[in-house]
């Protein structure tokens, strides 16, 4: 599934963009577009940013209950998240976590949250020997 098709459907209905469980959406924006999610982004399946992705995502929130994965961008490309809004956002957990929050209201996540809630975040960075991503403990 292409990410643009999910965005087009959700934005036409003024809904939160949801990547459903069991769906793998591949980001197909390659021109540096800014994509606005007025009602936020909810990843229950998988969202994959290949090296060709070149996009800015402007949203009120990102909830990850599935998988968000990014490969290092190709030369000249970038992926950027920017957040807007001054109202609290509420997460409604799925599957085995569905009872973790109030069934009606959900879990209050605050303003502009980027929340991994039972999901997985895999961001593969660029190899840079001058900036280690880990340090050996002694």
Image (tube, rainbow, N blue to C red):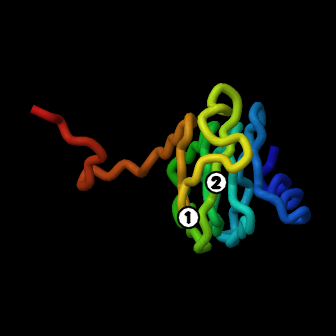
Q: CA distance from mark 2 to mark 1?
A: 11 Å
Q: Nearer the viewer, mark 2 or mark 1?
A: 2
Judge by depth and name the residue closer to the eye, 98 or 29: 98
Q: Tell me: 45 left or right of 133.
A: right
- Which residue sits at x=56%, y=64%? 112
Q: Tell me: 73 left or right of 34.
A: left
- Which residue sits at x=57%, y=69%? 83
Upstream in sequence: badge 2 or badge 1: 2
Residue 90 is tagged as: 2
Q: Looking at the image, do the residues carrying marks 2 and 1 touch, with CB atoms under 8 Å apart?
A: no
- Which residue sits at x=77%, y=40%? 20
Dot 1, crowdedness within 10 Å: few (<14), some or many (≥20)?
some
Dot 2, crowdedness within 10 Å: few (<14), some or many (≥20)?
some
Judge by depth and name the residue closer to the eye, 105 or 129: 105
Tag 2 secondary structure: strand
Residue at the extreme left: 138
Location of residue 85 (image quadrant) = bottom right
Residue at the extreme top: 96
Judge by depth and name the residue closer to the eye, 24 or 36: 36
Q: Tell me: 87 left or right of 122.
A: right
Q: Is residue 19 above or below residue 111?
A: above
Q: Is residue 15 above or below residue 46?
A: below
x then y, percent, for residue 106: 66, 47
> What is the quadrant of the N terminus in the image?
top right
x then y, percent, for residue 61: 62, 60
x then y, percent, for residue 51: 59, 51
Residue 112 is tagged as: 1
Location of residue 101 (image quadrant) = top right
Tag 1 secondary structure: loop
Q: Is residue 124 above or below residue 34?
A: above
Residue 80 visible to an observer of this rendering: no
> What is the quadrant of the C terminus in the image?
top left
């Amino acid at each position: 599934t292409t990410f643009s098709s999910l965005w087009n459907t959700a934005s036409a209905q003024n809904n939160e963009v949801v990547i459903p469980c069991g769906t793998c959406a591949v980001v197909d924006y390659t021109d540096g577009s800014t994509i606005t999610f007025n009602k936020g982004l909810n990843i229950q399946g998988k969202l994959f940013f290949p090296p060709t992705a070149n996009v800015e995502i402007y949203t009120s929130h990102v909830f990850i209950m599935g998988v968000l994965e990014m490969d290092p961008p190709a030369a000249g490309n970038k992926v950027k998240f920017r957040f807007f809004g001054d109202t609290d956002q509420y997460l409604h957990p799925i599957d085995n976590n569905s009872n973790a929050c109030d069934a009606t209201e959900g879990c209050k996540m605050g303003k502009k949250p980027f929340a991994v809630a039972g999901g997985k975040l895999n961001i593969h960075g660029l190899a840079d020997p001058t900036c280690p991503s880990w340090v050996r403990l002694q």
